[in-house]
Image: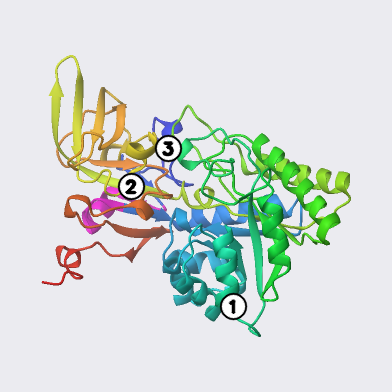
């Protein structure tokens, strides 16, 4: 398989992707244009080898430096039963944020002790589901939840292991919508206000709960390591004070995720090794300085595991060429399956899958089919001259596209296919028009 002319764009696709002898994009040994014909478009492709490679990479990089590390996949990035089985085989745990994500994991009998339940507004029903399934950990986010979990647990029931989510008030230098560890955030107990200390005191005094650790999450995606270093210092200093004041023993420190991936050619992300080195070094140094026993380290990559593994495929329909202004090329998906450009101003690259070896000849804007002017997938990208029926392949679409998809304009959700060693497997069927009305009551 040849590599084609544009190595930089190809590097954003799943590992091992290239241009085949027919001049078409191949992922996981499969001709992408053929998959678009077989399964229709829009279509999401996931490369199993890339997923497994990234799972191994996170385990190797962190545990190679700090053996007492658990890698927990953040399911909100993308999750279904097929992926859950792969993650279990790779030895990862799960970070779930709803009863729905928990139920997907339960459907494949995922080891429940390796499940962490996050979220800022867990319901009594969801907490009861977590208790009934006997999941490993509940990460408590606020005082209401702290009291609610105590009531759900009840007297004499199995003691639930919990972590407290604390806010270290560290700016991660990312989009405001995905910044989560600052003081003015809906997530976590702030340390600087004294509320984290009060929550810890209450949790330690609850006979239904066993406080095993602290959790923080700074935001996503983070293209630098300094915010982790700063936050670890703050949280461990808090843990040391709580040990002196209440005898708190920090068994686990969960530093969240947020590790960046590369979306466009000019904005590279740090290697996993850089995150691992910074986090582990700062953890060891802070523990030594504060006289703390080194806790188990928990990291929660989501995007970093699944992002590069996913490719979105769209079919070109019409276009609108405004002389001297812009040429819009229309595709059959858009903000209904990937709202990130409209919501965050996210940027992507693309290749023409059925003519992947051809030179870029014109500047176009890829626009979606939805009835919003903001439905722009990629603004001002150079591609070969496009024609009706061409297949646009957008890399790095594995995370936060499908989970935030909608039924806007009553458009069905796309199919999802897993590829490996030249074989393709449908892991989520395309919705039908009948599916759109199956819950209606007339």
Q: CA distance from mark 1 to mark 3?
A: 51 Å
Is 340 within the magenta? no
What x and y, as percent, mark residue 20? 36, 43
Q: Do the residues under discs 2 and 3 have CB atoms within 8 angstroms? A: no
Span highlighted in magenta in the image = 28-43
Please tell me the numbered disc located at residue 312.
2
Seen in the image, is 349 located left or right of residue 217?
Answer: left
- When the figure is inspected, residue 179 is found, relative to residue 189, above or below; the finding is above
**Residue labelled with disc 3:** 10
Q: Residue at x 81, y 51 (%)?
A: 241
Q: Nearer the viewer, residue 7 or 23?
A: 7
Upstream in sequence: badge 2 or badge 1: 1
Q: Secondary structure at mark 1?
A: helix
Quarter where residue 439 is shown: bottom left
- When the figure is inspected, residue 261 is found, relative to residue 112, above or below; the finding is above
Upstream in sequence: badge 1 or badge 3: 3
Seen in the image, is 373 located left or right of residue 44?
Answer: left
Q: Residue at x 26, y 57 (%)?
A: 413
Q: Secondary structure at mark 3?
A: helix
Q: Which quadrant is the N terminus positioned in?
A: top left
Q: Can see residue 117?
A: no
**Residue labelled with disc 1:** 153
Q: Residue at x 67, y 41 (%)?
A: 228
What x and y, as percent, mark residue 247? 83, 62
Quarter where residue 335 is shown: top left
Upstream in sequence: badge 2 or badge 3: 3
What x and y, as percent, mark residue 406? 28, 53
Seen in the image, is 321 located left or right of residue 128?
Answer: left
Density class for disc 3 (Cα within 10 Å; few <14, some 14-19, many ≥20) is many
Front: mark 1 or 3: 1
């Amino acid at each position: 398989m040849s590599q084609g002319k544009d190595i930089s764009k190809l590097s954003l696709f799943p590992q091992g992707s290239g241009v085949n002898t027919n001049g078409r994009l191949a992922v996981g040994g499969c001709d992408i244009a053929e998959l678009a014909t077989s399964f229709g478009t829009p279509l999401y492709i996931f490369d199993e080898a890339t997923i497994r490679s990234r799972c191994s990479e996170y385990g190797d990089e962190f545990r190679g430096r700090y053996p007492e590390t658990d890698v927990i996949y953040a399911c909100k990035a993308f999750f279904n039963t097929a992926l859950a089985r792969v993650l279990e085989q790779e030895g990862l745990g799960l970070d779930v944020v709803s009863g729905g994500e928990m139920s997907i994991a339960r459907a494949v009998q995922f080891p429940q002790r390796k499940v962490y339940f996050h979220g800022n507004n867990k319901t009594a029903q969801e907490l009861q589901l977590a208790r009934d399934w006997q999941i490993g950990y509940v990460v408590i986010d606020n005082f209401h939840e702290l009291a609610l979990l105590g009531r759900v647990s009840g007297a004499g029931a199995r003691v639930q292991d919990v972590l407290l989510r604390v806010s270290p008030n560290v700016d991660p230098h990312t989009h405001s919508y995905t910044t989560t560890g600052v003081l003015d955030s809906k997530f976590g107990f702030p340390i600087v206000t004294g509320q984290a200390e009060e929550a810890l005191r209450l949790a330690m005094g609850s006979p239904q709960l066993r406080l095993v650790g602290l959790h923080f999450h700074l935001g996503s995606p983070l293209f630098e390591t300094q915010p982790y270093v700063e936050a670890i210092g703050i949280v461990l200093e808090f843990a040391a004070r709580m040990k002196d004041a209440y005898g708190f023993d920090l068994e686990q420190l969960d530093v969240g995720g947020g590790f960046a991936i590369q979306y466009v050619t000019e904005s590279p992300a740090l290697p996993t090794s850089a995150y691992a080195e910074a986090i582990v070094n700062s953890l060891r140094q802070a523990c030594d300085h504060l006289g703390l026993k080194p806790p188990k380290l928990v990291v929660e990559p989501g995007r970093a595991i699944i992002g590069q593994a996913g490719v979105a495929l769209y079919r070109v329909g019409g276009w609108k060429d405004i002389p001297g202004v812009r040429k819009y090329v229309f595709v059959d998906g858009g903000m209904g399956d990937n709202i990130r450009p409209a919501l965050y101003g996210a940027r992507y690259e693309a290749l023409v899958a059925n003519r992947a070896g051809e030179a870029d000849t014109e500047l176009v804007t890829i626009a979606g089919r939805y009835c919003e002017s903001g439905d722009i997938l990629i603004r001002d990208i150079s591609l070969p001259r496009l024609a009706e029926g061409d297949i646009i392949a957008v890399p790095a679409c594995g995370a936060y596209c499908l989970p935030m998809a909608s039924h806007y304009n009553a458009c069905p959700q796309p199919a999802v296919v897993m590829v490996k060693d030249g074989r393709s497997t449908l892991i989520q069927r395309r919705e039908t028009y009948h599916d759109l009305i199956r819950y209606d009551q007339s």
